[in-house]
Amino acid sequence: MTQAQQTVAQAQTAQSQASAKYSAANAAVTAAQSKVKETSTAAQTAKATVDNGSAALSSAQAAVSAAQSKVQSTSAALQSAKAKTQTASQATSAAQSTYDQASAAVTAAQKAYDQEVQTSSANAASQAAAESAYQQAVATASTANAALKSAQTAYAAAKDQLEKDQAAAAATEDVAATFYKTGNDGNETTTKSEMAGFFKPTATVSVDANGKVTVKIFSVTFASMIESMSFENGGSFTKSNLSADQKTADWTGVAPGLANDYKIAVVINTGIPGMSVMHETAYLNLASSDKLTAAVEAGKRLAADQTKVDQLNSEVQTAQTKANEANAKLQEAAKAAGHAPVFMNLMMKAAVDTVGMAKANLQAAQNDFNDAKNALAAAKENQTTASQNEAAAQKAFDDAQAALKQAQANLATVKQTVENGPAAVAAAQKAVADAQAALEAAQANLADAKAELTAANARLAAAQAALQKALGQLAIAKAAAGVVNGATSEPTPTAKPTPTSQGTPTLTTAKVQLTTAQPAAAQKASLPQTGNASASALTVLGMALMSLVLVPFKKFAK
């Protein structure tokens, strides 16, 4: 059994291989036939081209020239179409701008018309209120202007006083001056001091706008001996303009205010060996000066003057603002109430029917808008047409370029073919012969594959028949063994594969899988021992046949 199954499997494998080989050989024959047809056509074309070489070359060159002319003409047409498209686009843009402007003009005219209607309706009702508001504005403006004038007058007076005090606060005057001795109690005496002989009997006193008092005295002798001088509770004197003989000099010091008497501390250094430095005090007595006194008083008033000027200036600004507001409201009220200047009244009288004029303007704007709308639609249509024409021109140009490229390629092919001449024909004919030889070889291979497939099919059929025979013998042996041992095991043979052929002789068979169980009693095929030593072969065969007859009935009974 195992040997028969292996033989069937090997036959199936060989048959599948032979079938695949036959299919490949058949495809090779078809390809070789196509190659023969292709090479034959190419050989005929090459021969015809060589035979008609001059005519074919002239025809190809003419085709190239025609294609070039077509490219030039379509290029010109394309440029013209592009220019027209651009012109149409510009016209559309201009029309769009005009349309937008006309639309805005209609909106503005409608708004103006509505405003005129509203104004005309409200004028009559508001005239009385406007007149009342005008009278109130007149009163308010008069009060504000009077207050402004009063504030300006007060400010001018204060500013004038400030300027006068500023001028008076700065003064310089020469006054009589002398030095008096200091008593034991430190107070001034009526006795002149020796210092009186050292200085001129006059002094120059200056007062500035800030109230600073400067005293200047003049040495007439021993100027170099006076080492220093200073005001009590004040500043020191500064020496200047010392003469060459060191006798005369100018002394300038800032006094602690304007006064008739100043206590002066003096340091005297004679320079004489053995004589010590002397510290003296004396009173500098100055004559009274109404001018200087007035300057000091004026300086004291400056701060108050400035404060008053600033305050009045602020009041003037406030009054000015109120007056400006009142005057502006007065002008507005005057316009609203019809109290405008004469030329304005004339203009208002000239524009009697403002509502009618606004309506006429609105109608004109609507007419312009309708014209602009129609012009825009026409421009858009022209642009669409121009764009379509440009697209068509572009396609014609592209087609012309493609045709020129193809014509140039054809010309190159014709030139190459004509130049190669007989060599091209010979090569084409050789290709035909090679293709024919390949076809014949493929056909021979196909015949061999067909014979091999036929033989494989025959071998497979024989192997399958042998397997069926072996299966029958096995069934008989199993039946005989079952009768002797009382067993009724049934072999289950597989279906016999059926070869199929389609068109060309190609055999396709199912692979056989044998899975029949084999009990040990069947494998040994030994008869059971009974009272007799053995049974004859005829008896055994009869029992096997009886078993085969009884098996179907047993299955039915189950």
Image: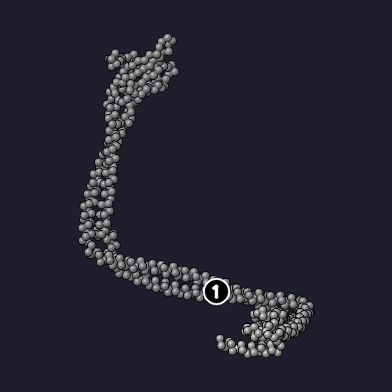
Q: Quadrant of the N terminus?
A: bottom right
Position in image of residue 437 (x %, y %): 77, 81
**Color theme of the render:** one colour
513, above or below 272, in the image: below
Give whichever of 293, 473 is nearer the camera: 473
Q: Note whether residue 116 is visible.
A: yes
Give whichever of 21, 115 is nearer the camera: 21
Residue found 52% across the figure and 73% down from its top: 387
Position in image of residue 199 (x %, y %): 35, 17
528, above or below 162, in the image: below
Residue found 61% across the figure and 76% down from its top: 399
Position in image of residue 346 (x %, y %): 28, 62
Position in image of residue 449 (x %, y %): 74, 82
Residue found 28% across the figure and 36% down from its top: 305
Where on the picture, by quarter, is residue 126? bottom left
Residue found 28% across the figure and 48% down from its top: 321
Amino acid on which disc 1 is placed = Glu
Q: Quadrant of the C terminus?
A: bottom right
Where on the picture, by quarter, is residue 315? top left
Give whichever of 558, 460 is nearer the camera: 558
Q: Secondary structure at mark 1?
A: helix
Q: How many marks?
A: 1
Residue bearing mark 1: 390
Q: Is residue 379 left or right of residue 484?
A: left
Q: Note whether residue 17 is visible.
A: no
